[in-house]
Image (tube, rainbow, N blue to C red):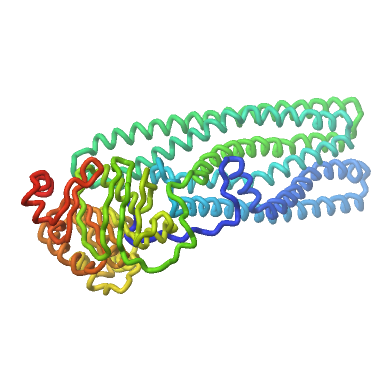
């Protein structure tokens, strides 16, 4: 696809943050954008964990100060305090979770908008080498993996607070138990981070393979009609099966790494807690702590299972988030294929004189071409690669290797890309349609002074509409898959004509229609574009017959030019090309 037939691209979304270029900066930006909510969530989660840690402590006090002494008033007082603690911790978790989830879902949406902003940037470059399915994986799965860190990080902070409160409580109950936790937790956390390194590496590979499989699947679905037409279903299936198996292998390796990681964390936590319980039991047996103190110590040891498990979960999600953030950074930091242009260029309505001077690159060899304003020009390019290169340069989707394209004497590169594409609209023969009605798709081109009925008739899109259940108001599915190839092509051509640009470049706009319809389209095209510059890149004799001049490119240069009739009569190579 060269460009959409609307002649423009959606405006760039303003962004108040700098473009990230590394995985670390993507992750920092995601967290920093909602640091207020994350701080509130961490504070509230810390309150929740503190309340949870105080439960076994208060139960131990109840045993020593109320049950052991048989004092009913003390029992009621301490139980009331225990109830207040439960109210406090539940309230903290409720509002803390609300803040954390808000940061999570909005960070996810923010990353998706950043990706969309970069992909829709008129200067291009982000989509290079990436299939649509792979980009969808980035915007859905990878963005969510980065965003979920916003929820897990406050939990990690709260887990640290929980360990600290438990350690202080155990220090109060018994100095050896408190020191054991204070000195034993840092090495345990270090081991958790060390064991999580393979998970981070394999998570990135898993997402990359999944993106490839999704991209291949989307590509096959898009071209299913063509595949069936040429009988290539088995070859396509084999290609997808191979890619899918590779993705499955990467997923299994990442899953094994995650299972091994979580299992190792559980084992380490279990051994650590068993050691705490063993030492606490011996201290109680020796009479160094009270019965209530032993209950509190055992309760705290059991409570620590949760925070220590959270360390493992947070580490796993952080590893996956870093890997996904690195993949997102590759897209956000991708270089642009064209420049921004000169913002001072006047947004005047151009006359339509198109000039190519010394254009080189992609098979073109110092190509010179002058198209006067208002001319209907045919361009015959036997080499599809050279045709594609020429169209990309005219559409400002790539900068020429040498030379420049001018519009009314002003370099096209001086215009901002979206404005340049408004003035010089390149419409591909396979331009995509959008979900909506047929008439909405035509009007998406931004009709100028042209009458809608007139452009519909010129493109023979009115005939396509008449054959549909609700006519022009018939709902069309995404990419126009509910229409035939010829219907899609005619609607796309009507959209391009409705845009009424100063220069309209059409690439093989009638490859999917019959000969009679093609002749009608050629006549209608000439009438609608009379007085407006139009370039037809095609080998169709019906279209070339209505042009005022035809140029033939060969080896990147103009080999011949003249009227279609003269070239048919005098140039055997041209005659063989357009009639063969």
Which residue sits at x=10%, y=51%?
A: 567
Q: Picture quarter containing residue 230?
A: top left
Q: Please indicate, yes or no, whether residue 165 appears anywhere in the rendered image.
A: yes
Asked if 391 appears above or below 498 in the picture, the reply is above
Give residue 544's position: percent from left, percent from top: 15, 56
Percent position (x, y) of residue 234?
A: 24, 35
Residue 166: give x, y in percent of width and height: 80, 38
Indicate left or right for 374 with 122 as reference: left
Q: From this viewpoint, which residue is outermost toward the left?
A: 569
Camera-side residue of 445 and 362: 362
In terms of depth relative to the viewer, which is nearer, 533 or 481?
533
158 displayed left or right of 483:
right
* Left or right: where 235 falls relative to 94: left
- Residue 114 x/y as whole percent: 52, 52
* Of 51 and 472, the residue lying toward us: 472
Question: Is residue 1 shown to the viewer in this render?
Answer: no
Residue toward you, 449 or 190: 449
Residue 574 against residue 353 in the figure, above or below: above
User: Number of labelled discs?
Assistant: 0
Residue at 28% from the left image edge and 36% from the top image edge: 237
């Amino acid at each position: 696809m060269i460009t959409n037939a609307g002649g423009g691209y959606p405006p760039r979304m303003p962004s108040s943050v700098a473009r990230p270029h590394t995985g670390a900066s993507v992750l920092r930006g995601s967290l920093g954008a909602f640091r207020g909510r994350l701080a509130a969530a961490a504070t509230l989660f810390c309150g929740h964990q503190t309340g949870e840690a105080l439960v076994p402590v208060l139960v131990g006090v109840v045993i020593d100060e109320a049950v052991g002494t048989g004092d009913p008033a003390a029992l009621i007082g301490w139980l009331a305090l225990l109830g207040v603690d439960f109210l406090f911790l539940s309230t903290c978790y409720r509002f803390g979770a609300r803040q954390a989830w808000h940061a999570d879902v909005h960070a996810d949406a923010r990353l998706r908008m950043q990706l969309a902003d970069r992909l829709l940037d008129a200067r291009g470059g982000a989509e290079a080498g990436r299939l649509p399915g792979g980009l969808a994986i980035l915007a859905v799965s990878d963005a969510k993996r980065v965003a979920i860190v916003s929820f897990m990080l406050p939990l990690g902070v709260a887990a640290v607070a929980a360990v600290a409160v438990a350690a202080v409580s155990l220090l109060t109950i018994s100095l050896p138990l408190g020191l054991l936790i204070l000195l034993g937790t840092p090495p345990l956390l270090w081991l958790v981070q060390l064991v999580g390194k393979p998970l981070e590496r394999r998570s990135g590979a898993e997402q990359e393979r999944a993106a490839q499989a999704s991209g291949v699947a989307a590509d096959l679905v898009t071209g299913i009609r063509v595949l069936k037409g040429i009988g290539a279903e088995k070859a396509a299936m084999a290609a997808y099966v191979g890619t899918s198996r590779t993705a499955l292998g990467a997923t299994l390796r990442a899953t094994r790494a995650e299972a091994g990681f979580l299992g190792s964390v559980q084992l380490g936590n279990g051994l650590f807690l068993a050691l705490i319980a063993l030492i606490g039991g011996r201290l109680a047996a020796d009479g160094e702590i009270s019965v209530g103190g032993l209950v509190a110590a055992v309760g705290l040891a059991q409570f620590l299972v949760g925070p220590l498990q959270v360390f493992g979960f947070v580490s796993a999600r952080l590893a996956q988030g870093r890997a996904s953030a690195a993949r997102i950074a590759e897209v956000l930091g991708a270089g642009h294929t064209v420049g921004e242009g000169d913002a001072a260029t006047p947004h005047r309505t151009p006359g339509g004189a198109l000039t190519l001077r010394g254009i080189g690159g992609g098979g073109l060899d110092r190509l010179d071409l002058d198209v006067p304003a208002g001319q209907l020009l045919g361009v015959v390019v036997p080499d599809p690669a050279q045709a594609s290169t020429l169209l990309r340069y005219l559409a400002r989707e790539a900068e020429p290797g040498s030379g420049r394209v001018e519009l009314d004497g002003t370099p096209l590169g001086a215009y901002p890309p979206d404005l340049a594409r408004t003035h010089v609209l390149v419409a591909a023969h396979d331009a995509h349609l959008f979900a909506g009605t047929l008439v909405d798709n035509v009007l998406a081109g931004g009709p100028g002074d042209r009458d809608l009925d007139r452009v519909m008739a010129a493109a023979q899109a009115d005939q396509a509409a008449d054959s549909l259940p609700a006519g022009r108001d018939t709902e069309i599915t995404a990419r126009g898959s509910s229409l035939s190839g010829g219907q899609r092509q005619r609607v796309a051509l009507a959209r391009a004509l409705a845009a009424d640009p100063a220069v309209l470049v059409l690439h093989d706009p009638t490859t999917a229609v019959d000969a009679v319809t093609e002749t009608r389209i050629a006549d209608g095209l000439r009438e609608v574009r009379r007085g407006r510059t139009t370039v037809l890149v095609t080998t169709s004799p019906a279209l070339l017959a209505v042009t005022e001049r035809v140029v033939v490119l060969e080896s990147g240069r103009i080999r011949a030019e003249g009227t279609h009739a003269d070239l048919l009569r005098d140039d055997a190579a041209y005659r063989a090309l357009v009639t063969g």
